[in-house]
Amino acid sequence: MTDKKREQAEERMREAIRLAADGTRRVSPNPRTGALILRNGKIIGRGRHECCGQAHAEVNAIRHAGGDVAGCDMVVTLEPCCHTGKTPPCTDAIIRAGIRNVYVGMTDPNPLVSGKGIAILRDAGVRVVENILPEACAALNQPFIKMMTVGFPYVIAKMGMTLDGYIADGRKQSKWITSDLSRKKVHEMRAAADAVLVGIGTVLADDPLLTVRDAEGEDPVRVVFDPEGILSENTRLVRSAGDIPLTVIAGPAATTEWRTRMENMKVRVIATSGIGADGLKDGLKQLGEQGIHAVLAEGGGRLHSMLAERDLIDRLELFIAPELLGGGVRMMPVPPRKVSEALRLVSSAWEPSGPDMHVSGVLRNY
């Protein structure tokens, strides 16, 4: 491939990435994908995976182009699937449509597909060019990639804090440290996540609903880490469990009677044998096995501390308000570490959020 052709392929791949990222509905446990159909270098079809169980990006792009795409090129962010799940294999659709060249952003980490989809296309005479902006394509689907390679959900820790590092005052009240705009961004994060997670302390202090209200999108699964099994039927979370999914991660101290009461209120209970951070880690792993790939951990401080203690945080979303409290609840009180062992961001972005500062940082890439 000449430098000019690669440059053109990368330009089209960036457009396919933007197309994939523009979807407003969650697609988990599937990955976000975008695809373009080109005839003589001109885009004639666009498609993305809109929702789990519906057609994949490749099929939607072929349909958008009108179906008559023999001899055309395809640009797709992820290796086309070659197995039958809720939809037929995309490789079959590409071959049947007579696509001539396929430019692939990255190999699918799913062992059912990885490398096999590309091999099937090549065996059918389709020319495949791999690794067009693979890092940018991978950034689209960090939760999916982590589940496929590590077998554990992608954890995003969200915190709102003052300049002097407090997330609540001495009475454990946090309403409202951050601005309206920052809270709106948090609701957008909820809409993008598969689940939102809080500790039982946050429920006792705030009685939250944990729904999406100030943004477009669907409510995530709401999850409470409640190792002792003390969540009350009178909380807004439990009262709304029949309409909006609620899961509780409970430890061995939770009684059978309490679990029965929760289940009678339509609450799903995940039982763990571990204590403290070990129980939290086990509960998250079970969530991943149930198709939850991206977890937004909203607090409180003890929950974030346990996540940090077990090195479970993949991304940090921190909103810093221009305020000083001088005392109260500290942000993420992690056990002391040496400078050489500090949790370090491999990449970060800083931007104003109304009067606040929003820091978005990645601790690891997959």
Image (cartoon, grey):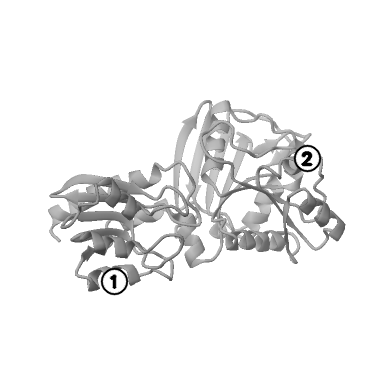
- On the rendered structure, is 8 left or right of 220? left
Cα distance between the residues tagged 2 and 1: 53 Å
How many marks can you see?
2
The x, y position of residue 184, in whole percent, is 55, 31
Camera-nearest residue between 305 and 269: 269
Residue 158 visible (yes or no): yes
The x, y position of residue 61, in whole percent, is 29, 49
- On the rendered structure, is 19 left or right of 319? left
Q: In this figure, which residue is indicated by the disc labeled 1?
A: 120
Marks 1 and 2: in contact by CB < 8 Å? Answer: no
Q: In this figure, which residue is indicated by the disc labeled 2?
A: 235
Residue drawn where x is 53% and y is 26% of the image: 355
Residue 336 visible (yes or no): no
Dot 1: few (<14), some (14–19), or many (≥20) neighbours within 10 Å?
Answer: some
The x, y position of residue 11, in whole percent, is 23, 47
Residue 306 placement: quadrant: bottom right
The x, y position of residue 29, in whole percent, is 50, 57
At label 2, the amino acid type is Thr
Give the SS element for disc 1: helix
Quarter of the figure that contains the N terminus: bottom left
At label 1, the amino acid type is Ile
Dot 2: few (<14), some (14–19), or many (≥20) neighbours within 10 Å?
Answer: some
In this rendering, is residue 320 above or below 33? above
In this rendering, is residue 169 above or below 316? above
Q: Nearer the viewer, mark 2 or mark 1?
A: 1
Lower sequence index among marks 2 and 1 = 1
- On the rendered structure, is 234 left or right of 342? right
Residue 133 placement: quadrant: bottom left
Residue drawn where x is 69% and y is 42% of the image: 330
